[in-house]
């Protein structure tokens, strides 16, 4: 058994909580957003109370001794160095620690709150505390009080029984049952849990494989959690900064002070981390970055404090640059200029994040001026979104894109690398053959259809059968009861079904959709196009209609065409408008 990569260790819940409080087990999620809902916390305590298993924990030895400089994890000052980092079990341990120690958590809206569970000793059931429960004498409204140091269990139980008797008489058997239930609840500190502690010598990839093989839910290990945990140990201020940026990006500033908020994109800490590491290390695969930040020499496999400190210095410098508000808001103009004015048009947040990383690299490391960089990366983002560049194996693809810059040091070389890659992808065959075929898909998030709407914004196109512009609707932050602009079937669904066209893929093709104002959509209903179109055309002159039909890729007299002939012709025309929009970005 000399090749065993882990050891099995049995803990009581009380011991786990003590090690977290002392700092030996690093639990950053007390300060990071807690993703479980309160019913999951309730069910966790109910399972423990009934003696059910709640799963195995997975820890990873940190690999450094207490002699090394470090920061501790958690709200309070810790007395010990975090020997163990949590790979699997953060939510369970956070729930236990927050409830049994009465410590507030940060929820997914970045609001601080307490996890309050109630317990009915007579019925032996748990519930999430609410106003009704707080007034009900049968409930202990907040079980955290049971584990407070000053709580005397016998006194607490007697007072509970006295309050109960004021409303309802109890038999001697019920009194004993209540006392026993309270004792059993407090005794959850002795509940046995098993942890597998993985050796510090095990690689990040092996840890991921271990996690995926033992995890019954088949979840993929979030490597960003590893890095954010390390930041909690060695650079707590940096972790707080990245999470504060993400929190402030979700809501407009209440005092009108500069903030990262914008209507298009509100990043999470994990997403911002990907930008930081791409800028700092020119890498996208987070397992490699985690190894570097642990102080691991990727060639020798050895750890050193000096190596770790060097890598954290690079990350610190990169994060300061990435979170600088001027850089952030200047970059967001790239997304707007690319025509992606509304968050629903952005099919790939990864493409947005990686384009931001390239914006920072081009500006900081290649000294490109903002106008040149914006023209280049606007097209890059449009291309990436249109082609779904990062939809499959995004880290691998981004590593390949970062490799395009290897050995390049001058701004013109940066530009040439991206121009060459775009030319390789967006060939005449792509525009004339591949793209029309992509438009034959009925996917709700068809990247070509979204790129077409972005192109309409770029080209300042009018809404079909309207004097308004597409960009005026998609770029407006105002929310109405009903969407002002709607996708409309040019050949209505019920009309097509009457013609015998039954397949969803045929009915919902992007080529059968157009953006029109919602009141026109109501007017059209399920009429055949040759009946409703003349009425709509009557409001516009010949030149206006010609312009509308050009941008909306509609042949003259389209409403009299055979349906499948219409789809085939319009797909080609939509592809041509997308290409025109992309090429317009070069101007």
Image (cartoon, rainbow, N blue to C red):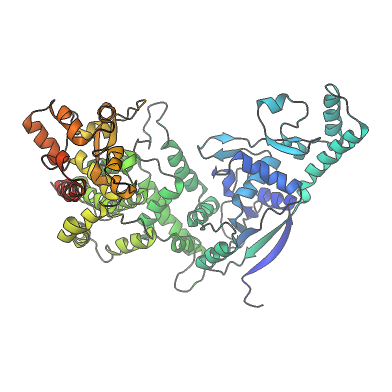
Rendered residue at 47%/64% (across/down): 307
Question: Residue 515, image x and y in percent?
Answer: 24, 36
Of residue 94 and residue 576, the one placed in the foreground of this image is 576
Of residue 324 and residue 46, the one placed in the foreground of this image is 46
Q: Is residue 318 visible?
A: yes
Instruction: Specify the quadrant of the image occupied by residue 252.
Output: top left
User: What residue occupies the far bottom of the structure in this picture?
Assistant: 2
Of residue 469 and residue 546, the one placed in the foreground of this image is 546
Question: Residue 177, image x and y in percent?
Answer: 86, 38
Can you say whether 149 is above or below 5 in the image? above
* Residue 545 left/right relative to 60: left
Question: Residue 420, image x and y in percent?
Answer: 19, 61
Instruction: Specify the quadrant of the image occupied by residue 114.
Output: top right
* Residue 10 left/right relative to 288: right
User: What residue occupies the far top of the structure in this picture?
Assistant: 166
* Residue 545 left/right relative to 165: left
Rendered residue at 55%/59% (across/down): 218
Quarter placement of the N terminus: bottom right
Of residue 509 and residue 373, the one placed in the foreground of this image is 509
How many numbered markers are drawn?
A: 0
Question: Residue 313, image x and y in percent?
Answer: 43, 55
Can you say whether 416 is above or below 350 in the image? below
User: What residue occupies the far right of the structure in this picture?
Assistant: 172
Rendered residue at 75%/31% (across/down): 139
Rendered residue at 34%/40% (across/down): 344
* Residue 93 left/right relative to 460: right
Q: Can residue 475 be seen in this view?
A: no
């Amino acid at each position: 058994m000399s090749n065993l990569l882990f050891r099995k260790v049995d803990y009581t819940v009380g011991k786990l909580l003590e090690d977290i409080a002392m700092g030996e087990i690093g639990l950053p999620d007390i300060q990071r957003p807690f993703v479980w809902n309160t019913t999951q916390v309730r069910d966790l305590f109910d399972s423990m109370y009934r003696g059910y298993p709640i799963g195995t924990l997975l820890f990873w030895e940190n690999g450094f001794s207490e002699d090394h400089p470090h920061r501790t994890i958690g709200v309070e000052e810790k007395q010990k160095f975090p020997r163990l980092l949590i790979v699997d079990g953060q939510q369970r341990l956070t729930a236990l620690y927050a409830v049994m120690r009465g410590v507030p958590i940060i929820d997914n809206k970045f609001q601080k709150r307490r996890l309050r569970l109630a317990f009915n000793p007579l019925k032996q059931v748990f519930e999430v505390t609410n106003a009704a429960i707080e007034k009900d004498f049968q409930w202990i409204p907040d079980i955290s009080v049971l584990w407070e140091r000053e709580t005397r269990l016998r006194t607490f139980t007697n007072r509970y029984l006295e309050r109960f008797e004021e409303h309802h008489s109890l038999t001697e058997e019920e009194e004993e049952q209540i006392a026993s239930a309270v004792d059993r609840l407090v005794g959850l500190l002795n509940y046995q849990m098993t942890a597998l502690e993985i050796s510090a010598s095990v690689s990040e990839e092996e840890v991921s494989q271990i996690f995926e093989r033992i995890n019954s839910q088949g979840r993929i290990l979030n490597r960003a959690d590893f890095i954010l945990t390390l930041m909690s140990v060695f650079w707590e201020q940096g972790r707080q900064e990245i999470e504060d940026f993400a929190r402030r990006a979700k809501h407009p500033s209440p005092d009108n002070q500069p903030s990262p908020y914008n209507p298009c994109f509100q990043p999470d800490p994990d997403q911002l981390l990907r930008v930081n590491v791409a800028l700092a290390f020119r890498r996208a695969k987070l397992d490699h970055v985690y190894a570097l930040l642990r102080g691991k020499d990727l060639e020798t496999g050895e750890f050193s404090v000096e190596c770790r400190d060097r890598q954290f210095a690079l990350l610190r410098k990169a994060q300061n640059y990435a979170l600088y508000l001027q850089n952030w808001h200047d970059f967001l103009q790239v997304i707007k200029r690319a025509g992606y004015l509304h968050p629903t048009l952005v099919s790939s947040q990864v493409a947005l994040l990686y384009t931001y990383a390239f914006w920072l690299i081009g500006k900081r490391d290649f000294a490109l001026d903002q106008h040149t960089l914006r023209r280049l990366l606007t097209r890059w983002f449009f291309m990436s979104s249109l082609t779904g560049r990062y939809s499959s194996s995004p880290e691998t693809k981004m590593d390949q894109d970062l490799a395009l810059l290897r050995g390049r040091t001058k701004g013109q070389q940066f530009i040439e690398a991206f121009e060459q890659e775009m030319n390789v992808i967006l060939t005449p065959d792509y525009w004339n053959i591949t793209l029309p075929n992509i438009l034959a898909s009925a996917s709700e998030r068809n990247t070509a259809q979204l790129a077409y709407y972005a192109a309409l914004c770029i080209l300042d196109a009018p809404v079909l059968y309207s004097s308004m512009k597409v960009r005026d609707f998609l770029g407006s932050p105002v929310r109405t009861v009903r969407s002002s602009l709607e996708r409309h079937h040019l050949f209505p669904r019920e009309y097509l079904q009457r013609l015998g066209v039954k397949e969803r893929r045929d009915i919902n093709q992007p080529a059968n959709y157009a953006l029109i104002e919602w009141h026109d959509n109501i007017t059209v209903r399920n009429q055949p196009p040759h009946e409703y179109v003349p009425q709509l055309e009557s409001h516009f002159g010949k030149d206006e209609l010609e312009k509308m039909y050009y941008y909306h890729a509609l042949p003259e007299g389209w409403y009299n065409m055979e349906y499948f002939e219409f789809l085939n012709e319009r797909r080609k025309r939509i592809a041509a408008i997308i290409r025109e929009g992309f090429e317009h970005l070069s101007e």
